[in-house]
Image: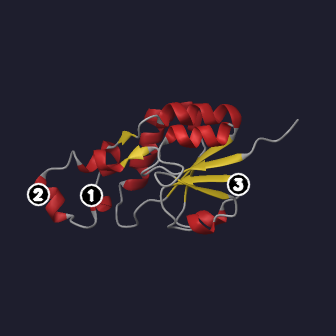
Amino acid sequence: MEQKKIVYVDMDGVLVNFQSGIDQLDEKTRSEYKDRLDEVPGIFGLMKPMEDALESYEELCKHFDVYILSTAPWENETALPDKLKWVKKHLGKLAYKRVVFSHNKQLNRGDYLIDDRPNNGAAEFKGEHILFGKGDFLNWRSVMNYLLN
């Protein structure tokens, strides 16, 4: 039996619409955390899924060995538990014990990394870095078309 290829999927900007959390903040909080909105306590619990992200993740799980690979802001003490709660709420059993938090994404082994930025080791990932939201991979439909064809 052929072993499934490994796919890592980032959260912020890939599975999760970061802007949707910012949009729910009041003006006072936006001002207080200007230029560091990822440090707002609880912000990661406010975020909504990206368009087609949940359905695409579910479909990926049918064809690949899929893991979530995300970072959490060091100065936001609620980020890790909020991100884990988000995964449980939106992906449940599909992502059960398949979440990796790391600021060094290049340390993970796999065939593909779907990430919207080259930061935190994504650019040094040994497999193929699919740069979500850019070039040929503007949205989940284009990513799925590439990976499944």
Q: Which residue is mark 1?
A: 40
**Residue 45 percent coordinates (x, y):** 34, 44
Label 3 or label 2, whichever lies nearer to me, is 3
Q: Which comes sooner in the sequence, label 3 or label 1? A: 1
> Are the residues at dot 1 and dot 2 in contact (C-beta closer than 8 Å)?
no
**From this viewpoint, is residue 96 visible?**
no
Q: Secondary structure at mark 3?
A: loop
Q: Amino acid at mark 3?
A: Gly
Residue shown at the point (41%, 36%) measured from the top left: 51
Q: Which residue is mark 2?
A: 28
Closer to the camera in the image, 85 or 3: 3
**Residue 104 percent coordinates (x, y):** 57, 67
Closer to the camera in the image, 139 or 92: 139
Q: What residue occupies the far right of the structure in this picture?
A: 1
Q: Which comes sooner in the sequence, label 1 or label 2? A: 2
Q: CA distance from mark 3 to mark 1?
A: 32 Å
Q: Amino acid at mark 2?
A: Lys
Label 1: how many residues lie within 10 Å, few (<14), some (14-19) or many (20+)? Answer: many
- Quadrant where the C terminus lies? top right
Q: Secondary structure at mark 1?
A: loop
Position of 37 with respect to 2 (left or right) is left
Q: CA distance from mark 3 to mark 2?
A: 42 Å
**Circle on res. 110:** 3
> Are the residues at dot 3 and dot 1 in contact (C-beta closer than 8 Å)?
no
Residue shown at the point (52%, 67%) measured from the top left: 120
Label 3 or label 1, whichever lies nearer to me, is 3
Numbered circles on residues, count: 3
